[in-house]
Amino acid sequence: MPKCAYACYNKNEEVRMSSSSGGIYSLLAEKILEDGGEVFAACYDRNLEVSYRKINSIDELPDSRGSKYVASHMGNVFQDVLDSLQKGIKVLFVGTPCQCEGLMSFLGKRYDNLVCVDFICHGIPGRIPWRKYLESMKNRGSELVGINMRDKTSGWSKGKFCWKMTDNFGNTTFQPQSENFFMKGFIANIYLRPSCYNCQFKGIERKTDFTLGDYWGVWNIQPEMDDNKGISLVLVHSQKGQKLFDSVSSSIVYTNAFLDKAIKYNSPILSSVKCSDNRKVFYKRINEGEDFIKIIEDLTRISFKDKLKIRIKRSIKKIFKIFNY
């Protein structure tokens, strides 16, 4: 089991609102940078591709905040991390569980000056679907140059976040994540990487120092913490991690989390998602040159039968609540 599990958020409102959940990553990264260290994290480039970058100053941190639902270009990041560690530089590396496992395997030994942070991972879409989505948007007259896949303008609780998109004309639009076609395909597990459907790096026990994630379900489990601005679930796995958490704790509102209950709302902690039956269909059609949005629109359309099932389930839940009031 982790050493500690916390429900928490960053006291800095601006940083918290620009983060996916509670803004805890930024505090850990800031501390490393203040100590003369370096941070390695995934950022967007000019083409909205996601690549790893070495961050040397707090001013650069905003580029690394926020969830990016696309596979990142790793480049030579493992070698760059090793070079810094061997020079005695403190390093914070943040990535998916498999990326963190890959780094530690590459390093071959534990370094006292390395802090490794993974996160609760649903799965990672490949880069081809992302490029095709951008292409599809461009063909519709909206060439995207800026994006936030987890904007909190519409809130955070119960997954009410939205996509904030800026086009090449400077226009900014906000779209509920439930209406965004790339998110629809992601949530439906249509184009995750093959390994994500049988992930070997699930579980509570991790070799990393921290696991970060959204504290989904906090509104039911610990509602006093939920103000609709994002709450982090933080699992601390090592003494090194606990020491770093303690060093920034004065900047955090936190309490112990009920991990057993939290897991029920965060199943990707323990288990892989099921591969969609439409995955092969999607790749066949996309490889034949069909439009991304049209394909996802077809594959995620809810049938009348399924809509009826959803309405019945909702009605049953309402009746259950009335009789158990």
Image (cartoon, rainbow, N blue to C red):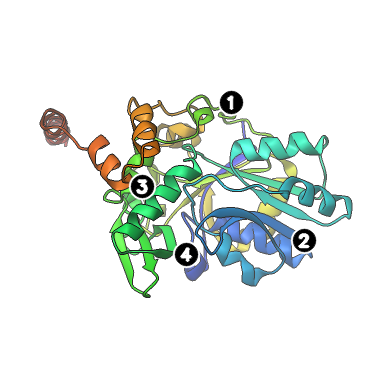
Q: Residue furthest front?
A: 288
Looking at the image, tell me whether mark 1 or mark 3 is earlier in sequence order: 3
Disc 1: CA contacts within 10 A as few (<14), some (14-19) or many (>=20): few
The residue beneath circle 4 is 18
| In this picture, residue 194 sits left or right of residue 247 | left
The residue at the point 66 percent across, 59 percent down is 29
Helix, strand or loop under label 1: loop
Disc nearer the start of the sequence (2/4): 4
Q: Residue at (45%, 35%) from the top-left corner?
A: 192
Q: Say the numbered circle drawn on residue 182.
A: 3
Badge 1 vs badge 3, beta-carbon distance below 8 Å: no
Q: Residue at x 38, y 50 (%)?
A: 133
Q: Nearer the viewer, mark 4 or mark 1?
A: 1
Name the residue carrying label 2. 37
Label 1 vs label 3: CA separation? 25 Å
Location of residue 284 (image quadrant): top left
71 sits left or right of 107 in the view:
left
Residue 189 seen anywhere in this rendered image of the structure: no
In 3D space, how far apart are the residues under numbered discs 2 and 4 (Cα atoms)?
A: 23 Å
Q: Amino acid at mark 4?
A: Ser
Which mark is first along the chain, 3 or 4?
4
Nearer to the camera, 292 or 182? 292
